[in-house]
Image: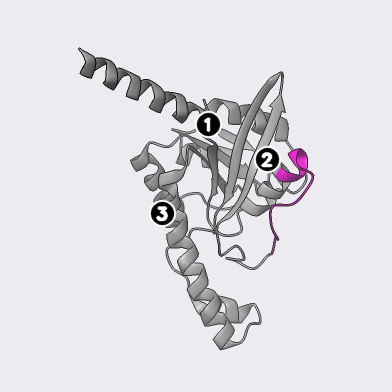
């Protein structure tokens, strides 16, 4: 009898501390989808500061970036989490891509090496995530090997997902095509750059972080 009670107490305290742990909310997606732009928007809205630098060069974010203790307040509710901005996921990284951006060969090869390590780290970090925001460029074809790889990894881990179609301010934006590609997830269309539809975005965050 004492053993059963001891196990009950152990389970009770594990669940208690689990509920009190900091929620890790990850930003995932292919390069140049707008992850860091969205991360900066969230941090500006609730902390008054940026998360990191934004660039048109693919794989500019090469290391995991974390901003701790962000608290969102919406309609009388509060959501506290640590935001994790990850390097863009790619199935192949070629140093020649960086040469086209004006880098010298040695620098380009080093950048490619760093970017590859960043992708590997991003996948590893999935095991620590409580929920994930997948940020895709809504002007591009969602049916890519990279996107399917990301979604497949999330489904395998049964992680709650919010699918974000970014850049809805552009004419080529096609949210219907995105929703058709991944109908299993709720989709929110936003413009992280201009802050469009961010209220709906924040409201949906509460749903996936229950």
> Does 46 lie within the magenta span?
yes
Dominant SS of magenta comes to loop
- Label for residue 124? 3
Distance from disc 2 to disc 1, alpha carbons, whole Å, reads: 13 Å
Q: What secondary structure is found at the residue carrying circle 3?
A: helix
> To which residue does mark 2 refer?
190
Name which residue lies at 64% across and 38% down. 189
Residue 118 in view (yes/no): yes
Q: Magenta includes 33? A: no
Frontmost residue, 52 versus 97: 52
The tag earlier along the polypeptide, 3 or 1, is 3
Is 43 in front, or is 188? 43
47 above or below 18? below
Q: Position of residue 50 (x, y in %)?
A: 74, 52
Q: Secondary structure at mark 2?
A: loop
Residue found at x 68% / y 40%: 190
The residues colored magenta run: 43-55
Mark 2: few/some/many CA within 10 Å (<14, 14-19, 20+): many
The image's mark for residue 186 is 1
Mark 3 packing: few (<14 Cα in 10 Å), some, or many (20+)?
few
x, y percent for residue 171: 70, 48
């Amino acid at each position: 009898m004492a053993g059963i009670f001891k196990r009950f107490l152990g389970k009770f305290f594990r669940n208690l501390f689990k509920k009190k742990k900091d929620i890790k909310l990850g930003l995932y997606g292919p390069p140049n989808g707008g992850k860091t732009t969205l991360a900066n928007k969230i941090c500006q809205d609730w902390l008054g500061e940026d998360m990191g630098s934004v660039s048109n060069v693919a794989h500019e974010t090469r290391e995991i970036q974390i901003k701790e203790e962000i608290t969102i307040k919406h309609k009388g509710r509060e959501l506290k989490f640590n935001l994790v901005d990850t390097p863009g996921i790619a199935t192949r990284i070629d140093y020649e891509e960086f040469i086209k951006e004006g880098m010298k060969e040695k620098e380009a090869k080093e950048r490619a090496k760093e970017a590859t390590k960043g992708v590997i780290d991003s996948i590893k970090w999935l095991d620590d995530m409580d929920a994930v925001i997948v940020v895709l460029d809504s002007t591009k074809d969602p049916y890519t090997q990279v996107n399917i790889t990301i979604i497949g990894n999330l489904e395998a881990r049964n992680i709650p997902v919010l699918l974000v179609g970014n850049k809805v301010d552009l004419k080529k934006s096609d949210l219907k095509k995105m929703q058709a590609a991944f109908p299993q997830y709720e989709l929110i269309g936003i413009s992280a750059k201009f802050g469009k539809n961010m209220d709906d975005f924040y409201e949906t965050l509460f749903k996936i972080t229950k």
